Image (cartoon, grey):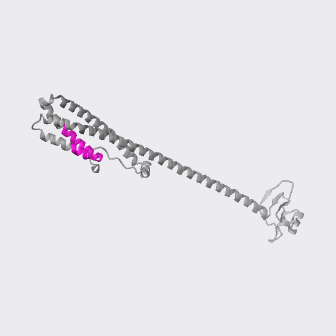
Amino acid sequence: MRCGPDVTSAIRSGGASSVRTQGRNSLLPSFPFRRESSVWSPRFSNDACAARVRDKTGWTRYNRDDLSTGAAGRSGLRQEQILGLTILIVLLGILAVASIFLVLLSARNDLIRQRNELGKALLNLDQLLKQRRDELPKLLGTCRSYLQDGSRLLETVTAARAAEQKAVQPPEKARAANDLTQALRNLFAVGDRNASLSLDASYRQLKKSISGLDDRITTEQARFNEQASAFNTRLARVPGSLAARTAGVRPQPLFSAADPARD
């Protein structure tokens, strides 16, 4: 491979001035310099002569092929850096999405578990209410034989018992249970004042059993309302609110006689 006449003359002249005076058509226009070692070795690129011309000052001048090769290398390095950064961003995005998914899945499972626990607590409360209702026919039969003028009290207890049995939602059950509790208190107050009835063994046993059920009902009611309040609070916050939509979970009404619409 042979160098062009302009390059050869520039090399033989041994000076940078001969290179600068070749004109605009020269193969070696002015470009940045860098310091080289004392050994000069020409470089060749494809079919074009890529000789590096060293002037008297000891600085080396590059042709266009040298500079384009360096620019291409830097461009390739920059593209590799951009690609690496893109891959890192994608991986971080996947990690973030996976973390959010796991958090929502855990919250969803916890909400379903709490809903099941609330269902069991409400079932236990219904069983206690049913046990109390089952004791009432015996109590009413015993009281009826002693209270000749207590028919109104007995009718009130009977109506409250029927209303509690028909109630479906927890607030309705709570109101009916409170009405029945109040009617039983009035009945016990009148029965305790009756000397004959207060000494009856069946009456005393039924009163003790119903009073014990009332205490258990009050305890279970308070426990259920506490769990339901915590459950509803979790539904109102993130991530519980988001998980509730996927699980189809709704707020749990409290077992309370208070009207939720008024609160």
**Left or right: residue 54 compared with residue 202:** right
Specify whether residue 255 is painted magenta.
Answer: no
Q: Quadrant of the N terminus?
A: bottom right
x, y (%) of residue 87? 62, 54
Residue 50 position in % (x across, y down): 83, 63
- Near-viewer residue (20 or 103): 103
Q: Position of residue 229 (x, y in %)?
A: 35, 44
Q: Would residue 225 be seen by someone viewing this image from the given angle?
A: no
Q: Residue furthest left?
A: 149
Query: As displayed, is residue 98 above or below residue 46?
Result: above
* Residue 176 lies in the magenta-colored region: yes
Q: Is 108 displayed left or right of 53 in the figure? A: left
Q: Tell me the residue at 19%/30% (across/down).
A: 202
Residue 261 is at least partly visible in this image: yes
Start-end of magenta stretch: 161-184
Q: Is the stretch drawn in magenta largely helix, strand or loop?
A: helix
Quarter of the view holding residue 215 = top left
Relative to 15, residue 166 above or below: above
